[in-house]
Image (cartoon, rainbow, N blue to C red):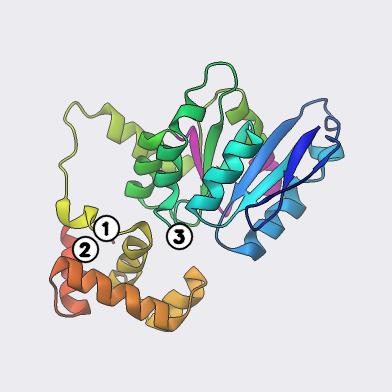
Amino acid sequence: MSDATEANGTVGAAEDRPGAGADGRHVRVVLVDDHRMFRTGVQAEIGQTAETGVEVVGEAADVDQAVAVITATRPEVVLLDVHLPGGGGVEVLRRCAALTADAERPVRFLALSVSDAAEDVIGVIRGGARGYVTKTITGADLIDSIFRVQEGDAVFSPRLAGFVLDAFASTDAPPVDEDLDRLTQREREVLRLIARGYAYKEIAKQLYISVKTVESHVSAVLRKLQLSNRHELTRWATARRLV
């Protein structure tokens, strides 16, 4: 029997564990993403256990829910969004470090994000994730990636692998940017889009948040970086190659 976990992060009634997929494989997965519609779409794409062998045992929308659900269900693989309320995917990895390090029943993490920024990729890999794929991935490739991570492989979308190779091939540790470290993952995402010239409405649409929330994030970024306007912000981001 396995615990079935509801989308709000609470543990529901136990259900009979479905059998393996058509090829005999089976993996228990938790979906962590703050967009309910995206979680529903992924569940529909990969969660037909009799065909795919993927059993979705839980969902969560923020850091606290994620830690609770992962701890309760002990899945083999967690599909983890990078940008989450409560501290982001890196915070989930930090709080689940003991589960990741468990030699007998390791919980492995595969980042699944809209972001393809080098700092996001490197951040979660350094935090303990086994791979990073973007949300443009096909359902079949995502299923294959999940099983590869379950088996201990490292999996990356082709363009992202170079970020990791470059970061870990360097003999010198990258300099710490204290200003950038003051920003949350979501604030960094808004900063990058502002620097690329997106309007507030366009950012809101792309990140599935309200225009007012975008404005709040921009105000927070300007305050933390001690900048006056979006033009200064763009210059700041460009100088750090965040655009």
Helix or strand or loop: what does disc 3 sit on?
A: loop
Q: Is residue 137 inside the magenta stretch? A: yes
- Report the mark closest to the observer, 3 or 1: 3
Q: Which amino acid does the dot numbered 2 rest on? A: Ala
Residue 22 shown left or right of residue 77 in the figure? right
Identify the residue under disc 1.
242
Upstream in sequence: badge 2 or badge 1: 2
Residue in the picture at 38% in, 77% down: 214
Helix or strand or loop: what does disc 1 sit on?
A: loop
Q: From what the image shows, is residue 40 above or below residue 210?
A: above
- Label ID, residue 148: none
Residue 232 shown left or right of residue 206 in the figure? left
Identify the residue under disc 3.
85
Residue 172 shown left or right of residue 32 in the figure? left
Upstream in sequence: badge 2 or badge 3: 3
Quarter of the N terminus within the rendering: top right
Identify the residue under disc 2.
237
The answer, for residue 145, to whether it is visible in the render is no
Cα distance in 3D space between marks 2 and 3: 23 Å
Q: Is residue 205 inside the magenta stretch? A: no
Q: Which amino acid does the dot numbered 1 rest on? A: Leu
> Measured from the top left, where is residue 94 in percent x and y?
40, 38
- Determine which quarter of the picture holds residue 123: top left
For label 1, count other residues whose C-alpha is less than 10 Å away and answer few (under 14), some (14-19) or many (20+).
some
Q: Which residues are magenta?
A: 129-143
Q: From what the image shows, is residue 86 above or below residue 206?
A: above
